[in-house]
Amino acid sequence: MALTKSRIFFGKTKVMAIALGKDAASEHLPNISQLAPHLTGNVGLLFTTREPQSVLDWFSEYSQIDFARAGGTATRTITIPQGVVYSRVGEVPQDEDVPVPNSQEVVLRKWGMPTRLEKGKVILDGDWTLCKEGEELNSNQTALLKLFGITMAEFRIRVLAYWSAGSQEVTVVDENPSMEQ
């Protein structure tokens, strides 16, 4: 199901809360101001004509694989083999991969990878572990993972609460809005 009859808004949470109404006297629709306490952090508002259950079902199934961010947890161990460094670092067969351009060698070293240039090729003198499964990732590791095209995060949207025009009530869906990485 595509949410084609819908509009989603992201913006300053305080401005969105004021738009809904701060209290019963300033709200545009009955009880819609009760959504305002849920507008904290990285949230948005979805306006749709669809039934609440169909929207909840769609969001519960929706996910996208994404690049990890600093502070996230490595989902697997990535070890780059010694020798010429390839653009997908062993994630694809070597005959389908290409060596990292020599212009990237400085960037790789800046991000902590012990590389050197030899005859225009980026070389590792020994196997090097980029990250270990279960450990927290730092910004250098996530930059290298992105450079090598390795995804380790899953993007999901969680519904915290909704207001229904039919019942004119706010229903809380997720009591714990803290985001886990």
Image: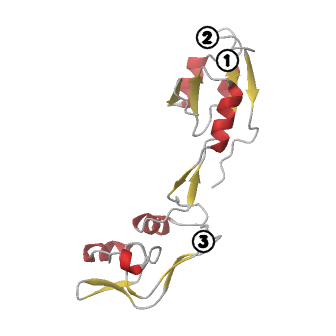
> How far is disc 3 from disc 2 in space, using C-alphas?
49 Å
Q: Nearer the viewer, residue 47 or 14?
A: 47
Going 42% across and 69% down the picture, which residue do you hit?
148
Q: Earlier in the sequence, mark 3 or mark 2?
A: 2
Q: Quadrant of residue 98?
A: bottom left
Residue tagged 1? 32
Mark 3: which secondary structure? loop
Residue 177 picture location, percent across and down: 69, 41
Q: Amino acid at mark 3?
A: Arg
Disc 2 and disc 1 in contact, CB within 8 angstroms: yes
In percent of width and height, residue 60 lies at 67, 41
Q: Is residue 78 left or right of residue 124?
A: right
The quarter of the rendered structure image containing the N terminus is top right
**For the view shown, which residue lies furthest in the bottom direction?**
125
Q: Which residue does the numbered mark 2 point to in the structure image?
A: 28
| Residue holding disc 3 | 76
Badge number at residue 57: none
Check disc 1: other Cα within 10 Å, few if <14, some if 14-19, many if 20+. many
Is residue 101 something one can see in this rendering? yes
Q: Is residue 33 left or right of residue 91?
A: right
**The residue positioned farthest toward the left in the image shown:** 119
**Against 57, is 95 above or below?**
below
Q: Are marks 3 and 2 in contact (CB under 8 Å)?
A: no
Q: Position of residue 100 (x, y in %)?
A: 32, 75
Q: Identify whether 92 is placed above or below 82.
A: above
**Amino acid type, mark 1:** Ile
